[in-house]
Amino acid sequence: MAGRKFSDRRARAKAAPPDELDEKLQSDPAAVARSVVLRQLALQPRTRAELAKALERKGVPDEVAEEVLSRFGDVGLIDDAAFAQSWVESRHAGRGLAKRALAYELRKRGVDDQDVNEAVDQLAPETELATARALVAKKLRSTQQLEPQARVRRLAGMLARKGYPPSLAVRVVREALAGEDTEDLLDHLELEDDR
């Protein structure tokens, strides 16, 4: 019961009455913008584009939003390049995503191409290859009961969904299956690799 009271109070505190928010926005839009940005950054790191969208949803005028975002950028609280580098490290280590998938996610979050390229380029090809091998090794055991072609599709498809190029996926799957007695499976891989 006590937990419910707390969450009810928190919900009421979060949702300011629309009239009160409109009055505050009219009287001091910069204060509203700063409050929104600080609240967003307290939850998790955000890109400048994500924060701009949040300010737009709250009805903060564009020139005020730009001024507040610039100030937060000047003091280092908004840094898309640092965000991108952290994102690449975290998502590659945690989810095993390849450069292509990481670049897509960063662009979707509004990070500019230069910052995306610099962040993704920090991921060495050897590291990407080692991660692909680890992903296949982890998944290999769960595919033992499948038909050979299904195993290849499952393993290569998993790597493709994580952004690995087809040539790398086939190479890693071929290496992983080479130790098993699967001559017909390896023949199938050679056919796919020729496409």
Image (cartoon, rainbow, N blue to C red):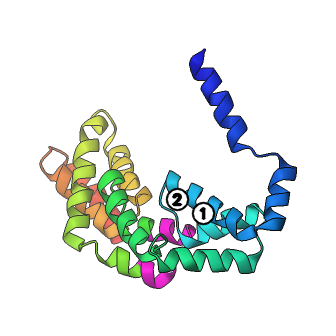
Rendered view: 92 above or below 76: above
Magenta residues? 103-116
Query: Which amino acid, by three-letter code, is at mark 1?
Result: Val
The location of residue 160, given as percent across then percent down, is 41, 59
Mark linked to residue 177: none
Q: Are marks 1 and 2 in contact (CB under 8 Å)?
A: yes
Q: Which residue appears at 60% of the width and 66% of the height?
A: 50
Residue 91, quarter of picture: bottom left
Residue 81, quarter of picture: bottom left
Q: Going by the picture, which residue comes out furthest to the left?
A: 179
The local secondary structure at tag 2 comes to helix
Query: Which amino acid, by three-letter code, is at mark 2?
Result: Leu
Mark linked to residue 37: 1
Q: Quickly name the residue at label 2.
A: 41
Q: Which residue appears at 62% of the width and 22% of the height?
A: 4
The location of residue 55, given as percent across then percent down, is 69, 65
Q: 108 and 38: which one is in front?
A: 38
Asked if residue 94 is among those painted magenta in the image, a careful observer would answer no
The location of residue 88, given as percent across then percent down, is 36, 66
Q: 6 and 118: which one is in front?
A: 6
